[in-house]
C-alpha cells in the first residue's frame, strides 16, 4: 500500500499535536508494510484554486497554476492508494491549508455530469485514492468533530472512499507531563489504528475507543485550569507556545486557584501506594492554609489546615508561585531559608513526581 500523509498544521515541531498523532499513525502504517510519504504543507508553496477550470478544458487533468502542488504533490496524490488528511480543527472543520490542498485535486475530475446513487456528480478522470481524516481539538467533547465528520462523509463516504476518521479531543493535554501515561496509551492506540488500516482496511471500534478515550475526568476543573493558563498568558504577554517553551505553569492568583492547578497537575502514577497529607501555610497576599489528601492514586483538596499533615510547607504565597513558575529554584530557596518545611521532607523531594513537574 502506498500512503500519502498530508500534515496541514502550521505549528512548529514540539507544539503540533497533529504531528504527534500523525507520527504515531504513520509508524503503525509502516509497521504493517505500507510505504508512506509525509508532506508538511507549511513547508510547501501551494496557491489557492482560482476556479478557472483550465484543468477541465485547456489542459485536461493538469492545473494551470505553477507551484509545488502541480509539480510534485498532485502526482504523489494520484499514485497513492490512501491519502491521510491530518489537520487541526479550525472553526470545527479542517484548516485553510488543508482545504486549499483538497481543492487543488480538482483535476482528478472531468467536467461532465453523471448520476451516482441518485445524485449529480462529476466522473473521475483518474483513480481516486481512498481517504482518511485525522484531526485534533482542544475541547474535550467528541461532538466538536461532528461538522468535519459530516463533511468528510458527504464528500468521500457516500462514494465509498472514506477509509477512516481518527479524531482526538482534548489533545492539548497529550504533552502535559501529568498525563504522559494516558497520552502514551492514546499514541499506542493510534499506531494500532495505522496497522489495522493496512491489514484490515478499517479501524476497529476497540482501537478507536482507545484513541478517543477521556483524558480528563473532571471537565469543570479542566475549564478552570485552562482559564488560569490563559490569564497567565495575558498577564505575562505570552503566547501558549512561549508559555510551554519556558516550561511555565499557569500561575494561580488565589489559594483556591492554587488548589485547582495542583489537582489538575497531580500525577496518579507517581503516587501509587502513597497515603499522605501535604499542607501549605501561606503568608503575604493572599494568606491562609490549604491541604491535599493523597490516597490510592487520588487527590482531594481542602481549605484550611489538616489535623495531622505529613509535611507542611510554610511560604510567602508570591514566593511559592515564583517557584511553581520556575522563576526561582525551590531547592535553593529552601537552603536559603526563604521558606520552611517540616515533617516528612521526602514528600517535598517527590513534588515533581506527584505533581507532574
Image: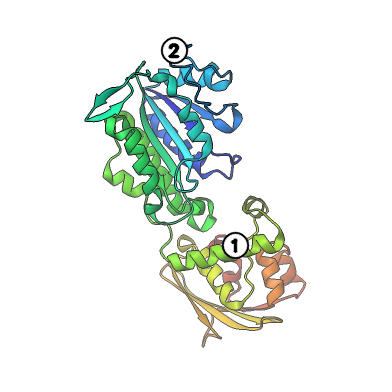
Picture coordinates of residue 166, whole percent (x, y): 38, 42
284 shown above or below 21: below
99 shown above or below 266: above
Extreme bottom residue here?
307
Residue highlighted by disc 2:
60
Q: Residues within 10 Å of mark 2 (few under 14, many from 20)?
A: some
41 shown above or below 264: above
Q: Residues within 10 Å of mark 1 (few under 14, many from 20)?
A: many
Picture coordinates of residue 180, whole percent (x, y): 49, 53
101 on left or right of 286: left
Pointer 1 with pointer 2, Cβ within 8 A = no
Mark 1 or 2, closer to the camera? 2
Closer to the camera, 269 or 46? 46
Question: SS at mark 2?
Answer: loop
Extreme left residue here?
118
Residue highlighted by disc 1:
229
Picture coordinates of residue 152, whole percent (x, y): 36, 38
Compute the Cα span from label 1 to label 2.
52 Å
Closer to the camera, 349 or 57? 57
Closer to the camera, 150 or 3? 150
Picture coordinates of residue 282, whole percent (x, y): 66, 81
Q: Mark 1 or 2 closer to N-term?
A: 2
What quarter of the picture does the C terminus occupy? Answer: bottom right
Amino acid at each position: 500500500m502506498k500512503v500519502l500523509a498530508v500534515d496541514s498544521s502550521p505549528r512548529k515541531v514540539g507544539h503540533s499535536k497533529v504531528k504527534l498523532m500523525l507520527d504515531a499513525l504513520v509508524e503503525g502504517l509502516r509497521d504493517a508494510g505500507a510505504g508512506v510519504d509525509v508532506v508538511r504543507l507549511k513547508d510547501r508553496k501551494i496557491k489557492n484554486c482560482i476556479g478557472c477550470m483550465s484543468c477541465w478544458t485547456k489542459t485536461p487533468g493538469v492545473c494551470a497554476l505553477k507551484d509545488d502542488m502541480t509539480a510534485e504533490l498532485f502526482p504523489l496524490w494520484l499514485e497513492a492508494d490512501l491519502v491521510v488528511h491530518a489537520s487541526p480543527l479550525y472553526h470545527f472543520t479542517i484548516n485553510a491549508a488543508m482545504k486549499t490542498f483538497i481543492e487543488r485535486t480538482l483535476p482528478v475530475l472531468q467536467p461532465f455530469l453523471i448520476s451516482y446513487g441518485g445524485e449529480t456528480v462529476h466522473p473521475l478522470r483518474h483513480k481516486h485514492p481512498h481517504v482518511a481524516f485525522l484531526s485534533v481539538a482542544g475541547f474535550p467533547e467528541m461532538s466538536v468533530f461532528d461538522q468535519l465528520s459530516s463533511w468528510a462523509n458527504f464528500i468521500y463516504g457516500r462514494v465509498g472512499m472514506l477509509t477512516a476518521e481518527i479524531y482526538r479531543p482534548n489533545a492539548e493535554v497529550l504533552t502535559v507531563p501529568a498525563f504522559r501515561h494516558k497520552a502514551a496509551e492514546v499514541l499506542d492506540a493510534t499506531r494500532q489504528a495505522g496497522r489495522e488500516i493496512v491489514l484490515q482496511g478499517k479501524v476497529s471500534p476497540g482501537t478507536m475507543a482507545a484513541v478517543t478515550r477521556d483524558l480528563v475526568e473532571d471537565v469543570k476543573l479542566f475549564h478552570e485550569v485552562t482559564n488560569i493558563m490563559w490569564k497567565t498568558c495575558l498577564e505575562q504577554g505570552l503566547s501558549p507556545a512561549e508559555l510551554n517553551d519556558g516550561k511555565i505553569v499557569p500561575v494561580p492568583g488565589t489559594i483556591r486557584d492554587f488548589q485547582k492547578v495542583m489537582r489538575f497537575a497531580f500525577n496518579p502514577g507517581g503516587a501509587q501506594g502513597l497515603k499522605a497529607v501535604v499542607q501549605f501555610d501561606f503568608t503575604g497576599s493572599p494568606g491562609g492554609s490549604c491541604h491535599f489528601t493523597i490516597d490510592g492514586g487520588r487527590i482531594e483538596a481542602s481549605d484550611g489546615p489538616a489535623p495531622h499533615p505529613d509535611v507542611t510547607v510554610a511560604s510567602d504565597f508570591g514566593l511559592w508561585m515564583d517557584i511553581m513558575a520556575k522563576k526561582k529554584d525551590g531547592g535553593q530557596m529552601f537552603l536559603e531559608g526563604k521558606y520552611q518545611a517540616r515533617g516528612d521532607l521526602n514528600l517535598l523531594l517527590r513534588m515533581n513526581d506527584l505533581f507532574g513537574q
